[in-house]
Amino acid sequence: MADKLKIGVLGAGHLGRIHMKCILELFEVYELIGFFDPDQANAKLAADQFGIMAFHNAKSLVEACDVVDIVTPTANHFESASLAIRSLKHVFIEKPVTNTSEEARTLIRLSKEAGVKVQVGHVERFNPAFQAVKEYLKQPRFIETHRLAQFNPRGTDVSVVLDLMIHDIDIILSVTGANARRISASGVAVLSDTPDIANARIELDNGCVANLTASRISLKNMRKSRFFQKDAYISVDFLQKEAEIVRMKEIVGDPDPFSVTIDLGSDKGHKEILFDKPVIPETNAIRDELASLARCIHTNGFPEVSLQDGTRALEVALQVLEKMAQHVLIQDPEVQPPKDFN
């Protein structure tokens, strides 16, 4: 068995403690040496819950480990990742990868110079429902996503685009392998200072069109994506971890009277409709993404979600925000739009 990787966690908030729990479950590949969080309340919670060492600063933690797991607020991602990479440490960094594309591209350059592995925490790539249908996703032409959440003040340090929609942006870019050609978007801030609900239409350079909706002020949670491609419709429920595949197959000869068919017209024959609901295994996506980084390091492979992937998702998300800024939704009837508003 390969030597265990010494890993430390920067950030002991809600998500940071989830990461610590998952790392402790991956005891065959990781040794959790401790964490650092300047918030004393967070630090006490983590120390009491896991009985691990609380370091006094980020530098001392980085120096003590092989892998740095960055689960800090987004504003601190670049500083933390730069410190770790310049110290020749492998890095796991939560999404969004950084605040700006310039910061993300600087990390790409630094990681290449340092020869270290960096993986970005786009966790939905590891969702078992998505994993179950990945092989069926072949050149989708239209994608529709809904990612709705009940309001939680904890996530309002960034807009709903960088908090929620970016998950679906990453999935769309990974599935299509295409780049955004044209983006239109609108959104509104309702309960916080940044947009809480947003809709974006992304036209990709391969002809695929994606319509994305994200909200953090909904009455119920929803994380669903629908993929439409030639002769197939694929639905993924990321929240319930369910998937459905509906395919159409050419029929040669007379159709089976017990099969579900569709008549395409007098000169086009029939197609059989096949329904498949894959059995989804019980897995922990955060644990799986952390385990994948360990495999990547030990095999000198490529991260399943690379810095380049995280950068592309961030850049599209920032373009969505830019388009949203051009189409502000006025909520207060007493507030008049500027004269050039259209």
Image (spheres, rainbow, N blue to C red):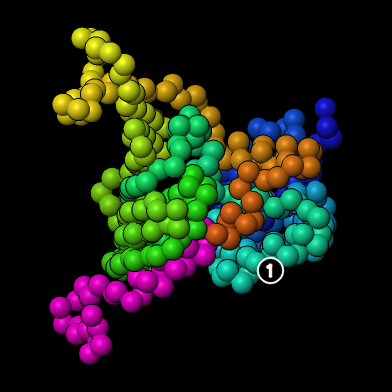
Query: Magenta stretch: residue 326 in it?
Result: yes
- Name the image quarter holding residue 103: bottom right
- Determine whether, in the image, residue 342 is placed left or right of residue 87: left
Tell me residue 138's x, y (percent): 46, 38
Q: Is residue 325 above or below residue 21?
A: below
Identify which residue is drawn at 50% across, 32% down.
Answer: 135
- Determine whether, in the image, residue 15 is placed left or right of residue 108: left
Query: Magenta stretch: residue 281 in it?
Result: no
Q: Nearer the viewer, residue 28 or 1?
A: 1
Q: How many marks?
A: 1
Tell me residue 281's x, y (percent): 49, 24
Identify which residue is drawn at 41% across, 73% down.
Answer: 322
Magenta segment: 313-342
Q: Residues within 10 Å of mark 1 (few under 14, many from 20)?
A: few
Tell me residue 152's x, y (percent): 38, 55
Q: Residue furthest top?
A: 257
Identify which residue is drawn at 58% across, 54% down.
Answer: 309
- Name the image quarter holding residue 234: top left
Q: Is residue 74 above or below residue 144?
A: below
Is residue 93 at least partly visible in the picture?
no
Q: Nearer the viewer, residue 189 or 329?
A: 329
The amino acid type of the residue labelled 1 equals Thr
Is residue 299 at least partly visible in the picture?
yes
Identify which residue is drawn at 36% across, 37% down.
Answer: 230
Please give the residue where the numbered disc 1 appears in the rendered image: 106
Q: Nearer the viewer, residue 257 or 282?
A: 257
- Determine whether, in the image, residue 173 is placed left or right of residue 76: left
Tell me residue 284's x, y (percent): 54, 33
- Name the quarter where the C terminus is drawn: bottom left
